[in-house]
Image (cartoon, grey):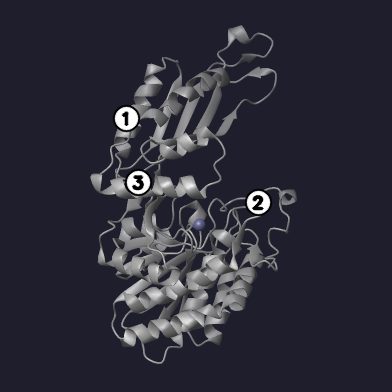
Amino acid sequence: MVRKAVFHNVMSQAEKTEHEVADLCSGLIQYKSAHPKARTDECVEHIKEYMDKHGIPNEVHSRNPLKPNLVAKIDGSTDRTILWVGHLDVVPEGKPESWTHPPYSGKITSDGKIYGRGSSDMKGACAAAMVSARILSQLEEPLDNSVEFWFTADEEIGGGDGARWLSESKTFKGEVCVIGDGNGGGKDNPSIDLGCKGGAATTLIARGQTAHGSTPHLGENAISKLMKAIPWVEKIGDYRLELPPELDGPVETSINFYLENHDIETEEQREATRRLFHYPTVACNIINGGVKRNVVPDYAEAEFDIRLTPGSKPLMVKERIEELVKESGIPGIEVAVGARETAGYYESPDSEFAHRFAETIEKVTGKSPVFKILTGGTDAISIKNYTGILCLGYGTSLTGMAHQPDEHVTVENLVLGVKIYAGFPILY
Ligand SMILES: [Zn+2]
């Protein structure tokens, strides 16, 4: 009963945070934390000022002074700790002319949107977490659970100075972790991320023999070989993945979620979405080779982003890629597949954590959330793999918005985020 009253109180406070959360999000966007520099020091300073102003204990953890991480701590009456983790680094803005509002303007529009690089991925969710920390810190009675809100660096490049370091060094300590990354489907299609796919970074190398560009028949063109070999690696996209039966349901709901929420225009895209979890995705995203127009190249390489569903067997995929390259019969070709024992991570939808988290989201949105698996990776992969802490995700991002020009987020989604991030520690 008391818990119910506290929850109700927190919800009605969260309802009034539109301006606060929008301003905080806009402020964070204006501190450019884009890769390759990806400095988070200014964002961290900004968050620290906010926490200090509200008397919320906080600590900065850094091993790279330009890429600090910050934790804000809300003490509960027990030492059972809930973590919330979100990242402050963002991907580069790309061509400035593709943006309607400048990418670091943090422009708030009258129709309730905030524009800028990082708005959806994921300074908006970080702003929501800041406000949640404030609301929880002002409760009259302490919660049962302690809560730590972590703001991290380097997520977009694997968390080296951020979540991976904090996980490896066991600085993250807690029972469960809410990941603020990703798209939670807003109020209409709420969802919980049970896990995310993992990558098998693959490099294809072609070697040949150099010659004068006017007598190509006297050399062996490495680029020509590479072009012939690339489709052989792409064939891995037809390799049916073996998945654990407990993922049947979540895979089905994930496919439906992406069919409904992605901007799908063609039948081909629809078919690719249906295959998204049962087969690897393959994208050849970098090609390097050649030195001069009049020199036959003796070296060329291609890099592939290959993504695998958690619970699949990455080492079998690796073996199959190696076989395919051999079957191609093209001489002078090598392939290196960066696969590990497991890919990504996933949690069971049947834990106490999953039930309470779903209950929170249902209370806030009025709809029972579906469980899905993210196609991209998050900090959860390091946290889960190095510390074993259970990780579930609910993000405030809009679907398909991450890493795009004109990236934006809605204030409505951020207020939902405040409610869910502040509400869950009360119900868990
Ligand atoms: Zn992100």
Counting other residues with Cα less than 10 Å from the Cα at mark 3, is it few (<14), some (14-19), or many (20 or more)? many
Counting other residues with Cα less than 10 Å from the Cα at mark 2, is it few (<14), some (14-19), or many (20 or more)? many
Above or below, 372 relative to 295: below
357 vs 121, nearest the viewer: 357
Q: Quadrant of the C terminus?
A: bottom left
Rendered image quadrant of residue 286? top right
Mark 1 to mark 2 CA distance (whole Å): 38 Å
Q: Residue under label 3, please give it.
A: 251
Above or below, 21 relative to 137: above
Q: Residue at 59% across / 76% down in the picture? A: 18
82 vs 33, nearest the viewer: 82
Counting other residues with Cα less than 10 Å from the Cα at mark 1, is it few (<14), some (14-19), or many (20 or more)? few
Above or below, 69 relative to 159: below
Mark 3 to mark 1 CA distance (whole Å): 24 Å
User: Can see residue 337?
Assistant: yes
Amino acid type assigned to the residue bearing label 3 in the image: Val
- As helix, strand or loop, the secondary structure at mark 3 comes to helix
Q: Which mark is residue 405?
A: 2
Q: Report x, y in % for residue 295.
A: 66, 18
79 vs 422, nearest the viewer: 422
Q: Residue under label 1, please give it.
A: 319
Q: Nearer the viewer, mark 2 or mark 3?
A: 3
Looking at marks 1 and 2 on the same chain, the residue that comes earlier in the sequence is marked by 1
Amino acid type assigned to the residue bearing label 1 in the image: Glu
